[in-house]
Amino acid sequence: MACLPKVLGNAVKHIPDPDVEGLFKEAKSCFSINAFTSSVMCCRKLLMNISVAEGAKEGKGFVDYVNFLNDNNYIPPNGKKWVDSIRQLGNEANHKIDFKSKEDAERILIFTEMLLRFIYELPGIMEVPQQME
């Protein structure tokens, strides 16, 4: 019996946009089959998709999407470095010939998961009605 590849990371709850959720799953799936450059590129693209899902206009430059996330407080305190790492490694994966390593992809997936948790999962948990004691 063949072993299924291990998918890095966990599911993130309360993502309302199916494209954002699907792209995150795709990034994790790419990692699971050692497609590390593709995984990093998906994480970069997620920054754009999240921005548009949260109200940014389509057709803008990539920096506009990152600025939208920052200017509208979708990036946690001290999290600009996370987003910049996702952007920077994603740009390298997208615009340069060299491949991204397993370590690069793992780090970017972890940052991306934490960003999704901050934007969607934690606020979603707060919206769930609390049981009366």
Image (cartoon, rainbow, N blue to C red):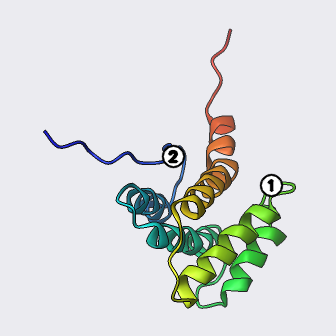
**Are there few (<14), some (14-19), or many (20+) residues within 10 Å of tag 1?**
some
Using the image, determine if residue 111 lies above or below residue 36: above
Instruction: State the SS at label 1.
Output: loop
Residue 88: % across, % down: 69, 77
Q: Which mark is residue 76?
A: 1
Q: Residue furthest top?
A: 133
* Front of the two marks 2 and 1: 2
Three-letter residue code for mark 1 = Pro
**Picture quarter with the C terminus:** top right
Three-letter residue code for mark 2 = Gly
Relative placement, left or right, of 71 versus 66 is right
Q: Residue furthest right?
A: 78
Relative placement, left or right, of 70 versus 2 is right
Q: Is residue 82 visible?
A: yes
Of mark 2 and mark 1, the one earlier in the sequence is: 2
Instruction: State the SS at label 2.
Output: loop
Name the image quarter holding residue 131.
top right
Relative placement, left or right, of 66 versus 90 is right
Which residue appears at 53% of the width and 72% of the height?
A: 100
Q: Which residue is mark 2?
A: 9
Residue 104: % across, % down: 59, 64
